[in-house]
Amino acid sequence: MASPRWQGALAVLAEMRRTPGTTRAAVAHRLGLSSGSATDITARLRELALMTETPAATAGRGRPSTVLAPHPDGPVVIAVDLRHADWSCAVAGLDGRPTVVDGAPHATRTPEQTVAAVRRAIRRVHGRLGERVRAVGVAVAATVQDGRVVQAATLGWDPVDLTPLGPPGVPLRIDNDATLAGVAEARDGAAAGAGTALHVTVEVGVGGTLVVDGQPVRGATGAGGEFGHLPFGDPALRCPCGALGCWDPTVDGRALARRLGAPPPLDPRTYAATVLGRRDAAALAAVEGSASSLGRGIAGLVNALDPQVVTLGGLAQPLRAAAPGAFAEAFTDGLMAFRRAAPPPLRAAALGDGAALHGAAATALDAVLTEESLTTWARLRGR
């Protein structure tokens, strides 16, 4: 528990982060603060360059309330999303809203050049913003264990150490991209307010996470959430991960190509999007097969994990929408009987392709919005 010095400040900053554009009056009401206490806390946060206030638009009479926002000279985090085909680098203030400042397609399929390019981008931001950069969060399309990439089958990488990405002395958080997308959807997206949320996304393969009270269930070593490697698929089919029978190869663009008798696509995500837009009989049949596999697998996850809500990211929702009957039949048939009357709602993810970047910013901010971190920031500000 935070000390009295920081308890109110952290609570106010958390409300600003949870509800961007919120007013001081609204925060005071939600936290049960008196007007005087809210004024004192926000005044201190302004002095520390943690928060700024601007008048809110109002149609009524009297003194307008004020909108709370990150201070323009305040702490920031760097968020990186290392995807199958490209990468992006963003900066986020204490509200957790990332603004992309750099990015590029992967120049090669080997990690060295990509990691070097991302490292240069991070160093450029750090060089420009200096001590304002308080943490770095990295989302990567790979299996992450104890903060290190141990398997990156979709990227075609061997194990890679990404810890050199962080500037010296700056906290670095590295996690799977689907896990971080699920965190973002649970905190700020389609599952906001749910205590237990399941996120399933289809990109190159199937990923996701179970989020409980805003935190992902990572498992013993951090490698949890590899849903695409559950044995929901063809037991005769070898997955690039090395296992037999994985769910991944029965759902994504590789699965669609196989059903259509086409060679494995170099870019399975783009290929899948193209097939989803076709209306010929062969494409429709292939999509139905993938949608059935997706629905059946999600039912299995619901049976095992008991979420309040399921969010569908990436191509999962378009795949469901392209073959709603096949998906619904497989999902319903896969549920335990007692769940069928009131299954958890299935919602399209709200944050789109930026969900992993939002999640990377969110987990980086978790390292910033602590008593220890804010005490260090106050010391840097001479307070």
Image (spheres, grey):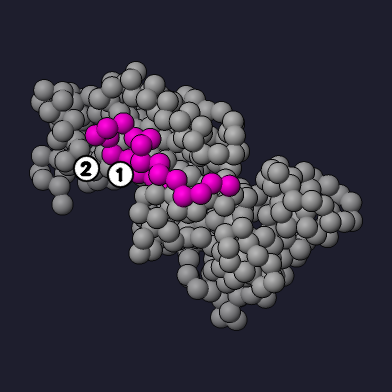
Q: Secondary structure at mark 2?
A: loop
Q: Residue at x 47, y 24 (%)?
A: 101
Where is residue 196 shown, x and y percent of the image?
A: 43, 62
Residue 314 in view, yes or no: yes
Q: Is 25 in the magenta?
A: no
Q: Main structural element of the magenta stretch: helix, strand or loop?
A: loop
Q: Residue furthest bottom?
A: 337
Badge 2: few (under 14), some or many (20 or more) residues near its Cα, within 10 Å? some
Question: Which quadrant of the view contains residue 6?
Answer: top left
Q: Residue at x 36, y 37 (%)?
A: 164
Discs 2, 1 touching: Cβ within 8 Å: yes
Read off the residue under disc 2: 370
Front-lying residue, 344 or 163: 163
Where is residue 302 shown, x and y percent of the image?
A: 54, 69
Front-lying residue, 330 or 287: 287
Q: Residue furthest top?
A: 128
Read off the residue under disc 1: 366
Badge 1: few (under 14), some or many (20 or more) residues near its Cα, within 10 Å? few
Q: Residue at x 69, y 62 (%)?
A: 250
- The kind of residue on which mark 1 rests is Asp
Q: For residue 46, which numbered disc appears in the image?
A: none
For the magenta stretch, what is the residue range? 156-175
Q: CA distance from mark 2 to mark 1?
A: 7 Å
Apparent side of residue 374 relative to residue 294 in the rendered image (left or right):
left
Apparent side of residue 376 relative to residue 283 in the rendered image (left or right):
left
Above or below for 304 versus 376: below
